[in-house]
Image: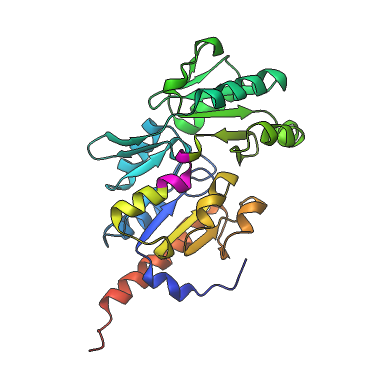
C-alpha cells in the first residue's frame, strides 16, 4: 500500500462497495452502523454502488434495505439493475464455449459447480456448497443436472471446494479459464470478460458522469482487484486477500468489526464539511 491522505476523501463523488467480506459482517448481514453510514452518504446525493457476487434477488433486497436508489451490480457485475423500478438495464451472459470449459473443469478436477441465471442459482447436487450459497444469498438454490444448462441464460459460474483443494487446482483452473477470480477461499468465480465488476462499474460511472479518480471503493477478494486498481481511492478490508492489499492505498478494519463503516463515516463528514465550507471568490 502507498501513503494515503484521508483528507482526499472530501472530493469523493461516488462510492463502490463489495458486499461479502466488506459491508456484510461475519453473519453475512449488513450491520445497523454500516447501513446508517451508507444512508448518510446517499443523503448527500453521493451514489453508493453495490458491486457484488450475490444474486440479483438478494442484491435487490439489500439495496432497498439500506436505501440505495441508484443502479447496482449483482452476479459479479453480469447484471446491472434499477432497485427502485426492479428492472434490468444490462445483462451479459457467458459464451457457450466458456460454459463448456467450466463444465469440463468441474468433471476433470472433481470440483463442485454452480451456475447462475439473472433470476436463479442452480447446483448439481445438494450439499455444503448449496447450503453456503443459500446462507449467503438468503434464497433458494435449485438442484438440476449439469446436462440441462442453457448457455444463453448463464451469467455466472463458480467452482467450489476446500481452500486447500482450490489452492492445488489454481494453476490448472487459470490455465484453462484465465478470467477466473478467487472471490472467497472456497470459490472461483467466472463471468464474461465484459461482465466483471470493473466492466459494470465503468458502465455505471459513465451513466453518472463520474470519473473513476473520484470513486472511493472497498473490497476484500480477488474479484475486487480489477476495479480497485482503477479507482482513485481504493481501500482494502482488514480481512482482504493479499492481491487486494497490493493494489489499495489504505487498509481499514475487519468486515466483522464494521471496518467499512469506519471509512464511510469519515468520508461522509469530509464530503459534508467540504460542501459547507465557504467558497473562495
Q: Quadrant of the N terminus?
A: bottom right
Left or right placement of residue 219 versus residue 268 in this view: right
Instruction: Compare residues 40 and 189 and report the one nearer the observer.
Output: 189
Q: Which residue is found at the position 30% from the left and 48% from the top?
A: 68
Q: How is the image coloured?
A: rainbow
Compared with 68, 185 (above or below) is above
Residue 240 in magenta? no
Q: Which residue is found at the position 55% from the left and 13% from the top?
A: 146
Left or right placement of residue 209 versus residue 162 in this view: left
Position of residue 8 measured from the top left corner of the image (x, y, whole percent)? 44, 73
Compared with 34, 181 (above or below) is above
Instruction: Compare residues 267 and 85 and report the one nearer the observer.
Output: 85
Position of residue 51 measured from the top left corner of the image (x, y, whole percent)? 44, 45
Q: Is residue 78 visible?
A: yes
Quarter of the figure with residue 26: top right
Majority SS type along the magenta span: helix
Q: Quadrant of the C terminus?
A: bottom left
Position of residue 152 measured from the top left corner of the image (x, y, whole percent)? 43, 21
Residues drawn in magenta: 194-200
Compared with 180, 34 (above or below) is below
Position of residue 114 measured from the top left corner of the image (x, y, whole percent)? 55, 23
Residue 198 in magenta? yes
Instruction: Compare residues 141 and 170 and report the one nearer the observer.
Output: 170
Amino acid at each position: 500500500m502507498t501513503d494515503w491522505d484521508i483528507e482526499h476523501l472530501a472530493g469523493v463523488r461516488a462510492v463502490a462497495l463489495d458486499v461479502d467480506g466488506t459491508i456484510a459482517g461475519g453473519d453475512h448481514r449488513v450491520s445497523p452502523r454500516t447501513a446508517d453510514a451508507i444512508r448518510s452518504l446517499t443523503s448527500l446525493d453521493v451514489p453508493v454502488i453495490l458491486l457484488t457476487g450475490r444474486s440479483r434477488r438478494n442484491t435487490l433486497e439489500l439495496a432497498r434495505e439500506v436505501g440505495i436508489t441508484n443502479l447496482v451490480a449483482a452476479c459479479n457485475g453480469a447484471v446491472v439493475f434499477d432497485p427502485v423500478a426492479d428492472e434490468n438495464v444490462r445483462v451479459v451472459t457467458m459464451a457457450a464455449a466458456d460454459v463448456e470449459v467450466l463444465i469440463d473443469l468441474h468433471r476433470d478436477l472433481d470440483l463442485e459447480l454452480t451456475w447462475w441465471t439473472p433470476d436463479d442459482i442452480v447446483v448439481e447436487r445438494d450439499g455444503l456448497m448449496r447450503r453456503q450459497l443459500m446462507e449467503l444469498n438468503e434464497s433458494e438454490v435449485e438442484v438440476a443436472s449439469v446436462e440441462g444448462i442453457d448457455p444463453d441464460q448463464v451469467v455466472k459460474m463458480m467452482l467450489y471446494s476446500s481452500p486447500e483443494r482450490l489452492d492445488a487446482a489454481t494453476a490448472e483452473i487459470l490455465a484453462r479459464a484465465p478470467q477466473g477470480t478467487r472471490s472467497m477461499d472456497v470459490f472461483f468465480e467466472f463471468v464474461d470478460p465484459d461482465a466483471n465488476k470493473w466492466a459494470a462499474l465503468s458502465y455505471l460511472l459513465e451513466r453518472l458522469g463520474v470519473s473513476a479518480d473520484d470513486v472511493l471503493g472497498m473490497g476484500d477478494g480477488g474479484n475486487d482487484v480489477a476495479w480497485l486498481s482503477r479507482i482513485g481511492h481504493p481501500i482494502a478490508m482488514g480481512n482482504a486477500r493479499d492481491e487486494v492489499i497490493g493494489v489499495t492505498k489504505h487498509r481499514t478494519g475487519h468486515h466483522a468489526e464494521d471496518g467499512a463503516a469506519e471509512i464511510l463515516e469519515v468520508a461522509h463528514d469530509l464530503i459534508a464539511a467540504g460542501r459547507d465550507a465557504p467558497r473562495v471568490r
